């Protein structure tokens, strides 16, 4: 085995939901010190501008459905750069372990004998609703919170989403990556018995200056989303807590 002493550390850093002031102090320190930074578009311009001129910057460009670098290639680059003894930051939107494939990257690096440190970030699943005036839990409205991915292929046999169970659950349901499959997802919930009048909010570009909030009900939101041309990145919140939106928004 090679001498691991000379390997660089890889930091899997959460960059928060978009507002640069929601970056952690630790994340900022690491971004401004890194030798190599792998990033995509989620962190936003202001955070990307903090990267030092001297750093090698690699855009791995993950947008919905299109990858500039495949996950295998990303892992390969992380391993290579760390083995060169460089300090590597893998910057990820929100929290690196919430639908960020951070777990896979960390496992791959550990297998290669590389030291990995995870720097948690504020996840959009909670922060985007919060900045829109929607608390994901509330003593009178919801004592449970479930966060799911909305882009699972419905034709996939091994889906891990149990829509029947989700429809019966009366806490807050937050869907990430759910714009494309919104219509399918809400119809599954209705099909399995979730009340059609359950309030729904979609927050696009949450916590950023150009954040937009669209509200409706389980029955109406798919049509409204089409009319409003809702685009990713967006968080969908389903549940009674959404009724607090009018009261708590600025
Ligand atoms: N690790 C990230 C999630 C990565 S999956 C986190 O913890 O936030 C990418 C999805 O996150 C997007 O499709 C969208 O659903 C959501 N997302 C990320 N940033 C967002 C933002 N500023 N506003 C709304 N949704 C956001």
Image (tube, rainbow, N blue to C red):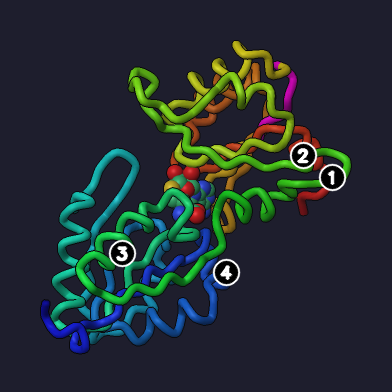
Give how far apart the Cα atoms at labels 2 and 3 are.
33 Å
State the residue at coordinates (54%, 27%).
225
Give how far apart the Cα atoms at labels 2 and 1 are.
11 Å
SS for tag 3? strand
Mark 4 sits on what residue?
A: 22
Q: Which mark is residue 241?
A: 2
Give how far apart the Cα atoms at labels 2 and 4 are.
23 Å
Q: Which mark is residue 39?
A: 3
- Residue 200 belongs to the span the image colors magenta: yes
Q: Earlier in the sequence, mark 2 or mark 4?
A: 4
Q: Which residues are magenta?
A: 196-201
Q: Residue furthest left?
A: 2
User: Does residue 207 lie above or below 136 as drawn?
Assistant: below
Determine crowd level at label 3: few under 14, some 14-19, many 20+ residues with C-alpha closer than 10 A.
Answer: many
State yes or no: discs 3 and 1 in contact (Cβ < 8 Å): no
Query: Residue 197: x percent and y percent?
Result: 74, 19
SS for tag 4? helix
Query: Residue 218: x percent and y percent?
Result: 65, 22
Q: Which mark is residue 247?
A: 1
Q: Earlier in the sequence, mark 4 or mark 3?
A: 4
Q: Earlier in the sequence, mark 4 or mark 1?
A: 4
């Amino acid at each position: 085995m090679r001498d691991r002493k000379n390997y660089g550390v890889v930091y899997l850093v959460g960059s928060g939901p978009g507002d640069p002031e929601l970056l952690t102090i630790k994340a900022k320190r690491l971004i401004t010190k890194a030798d190599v930074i792998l990033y995509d578009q989620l962190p936003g311009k202001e955070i990307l501008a903090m990267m030092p001129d001297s750093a090698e910057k690699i855009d791995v460009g993950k947008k919905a459905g299109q990858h500039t670098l495949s996950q295998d290639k990303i892992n390969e680059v992380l391993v290579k750069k760390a083995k060169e003894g460089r300090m590597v930051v893998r910057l990820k939107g929100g929290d690196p372990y919430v639908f960020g494939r951070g777990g896979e990257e960390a496992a791959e690096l550990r297998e290669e004998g590389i030291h990995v440190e995870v720097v948690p970030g504020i996840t959009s699943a909670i922060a985007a609703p919060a900045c829109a005036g929607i608390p994901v839990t509330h003593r009178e409205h919801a004592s449970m919170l479930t966060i799911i991915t909305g882009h699972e292929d419905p034709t996939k046999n091994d889906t891990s989403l149990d829509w029947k169970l989700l429809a019966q659950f009366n806490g807050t349901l937050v869907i990430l990556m759910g714009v494309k499959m919104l219509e399918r997802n809400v119809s599954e919930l209705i099909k399995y018995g979730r009340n059609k009048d359950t309030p729904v909010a979609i927050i696009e570009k949450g916590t950023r200056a150009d954040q937009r909030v669209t509200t409706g009900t389980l029955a109406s939101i798919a049509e409204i989303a089409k009319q409003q041309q809702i685009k990713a990145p967006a968080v969908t919140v389903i549940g009674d807590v959404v009724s607090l939106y009018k009261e708590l928004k600025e």
